[in-house]
Structures are given as C-alpha cells and as structure tokens.
Image (cartoon, rainbow, N blue to C red):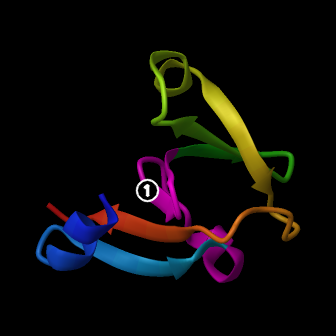
Amino acid sequence: MLDWLEGNTKYAKNIGNLKSNVGSLKAGDILIRRGHVEIFAYKSGGTIYVYNCGSNHGISNVDVIGDTNGNRGSYTIYRLTK
C-alpha cells in the first residue's frame, strides 16, 4: 500500500506525520505505519478513531489508535486527491 501511495502522487498526497499534522486530519485520510493501514474516521474528546484494515471486524467498526495529545504511533497521513 505504501509503495503504491508514494508512487502515485497524481492520486495521493503525503500530508506528513500524524504527530505534527493531527489538526489537519479529514475523514477518509489513510494513516500508514510499518505493517499497519488505518482509515481515519473522526476525532472526539481528544481521541483519534480509525477503521483498521486488518480484518472484517476492524474495517466494520471504529477503533482507537491514540489521542490528540501526542500518544499515538508514528503514522504518515495520505489523502487521496482524485
């Protein structure tokens, strides 16, 4: 997934790392870190909620990956442009 996103700048834009860009998250943003792909759902009460792409359950239910105070993994944010 990461190779495809980085090689297709026509279709996806690298927004930067999650820690520095948490305020710019939009629903549908793709969050990637080594071995993990998440789809951003929303923020609520300082908590970041995502859909996890690792299983049918994960993609069907929102899950927490961290909070907006810096307690989160080292994800990179990608946004589809087309």
Give the answer, above or below, for where 20 lies relative to 24: below
Count neighbours of disc 1 (C-alpha within 10 A) and say few if under 14, some if 14 to 19, many if 20 or more. many
Secondary structure found at label 1 = loop
The span shown in magenta is 19-39
Q: Residue furthest front?
A: 35
- Left/right placement of residue 25 relative to residue 22 reads left
Q: Which of 46 and 54 is in front in this view?
A: 54
Query: In the rendering, at what x and y percent does residue 10 appear?
Result: 11, 75
Residue 29 within the segment the image draws in magenta: yes
Which quadrant of the figure contains the N terminus?
bottom left
Q: Nearer the viewer, residue 66 or 53?
A: 53
Residue sitting at x 14%, y 73%: 8
Give the answer, above or below, for where 12 lies relative to 49: below
Which residue has dot 1 on it? 29
- Left/right placement of residue 67 relative to residue 33 reads right
Residue 42 within the segment the image draws in magenta: no
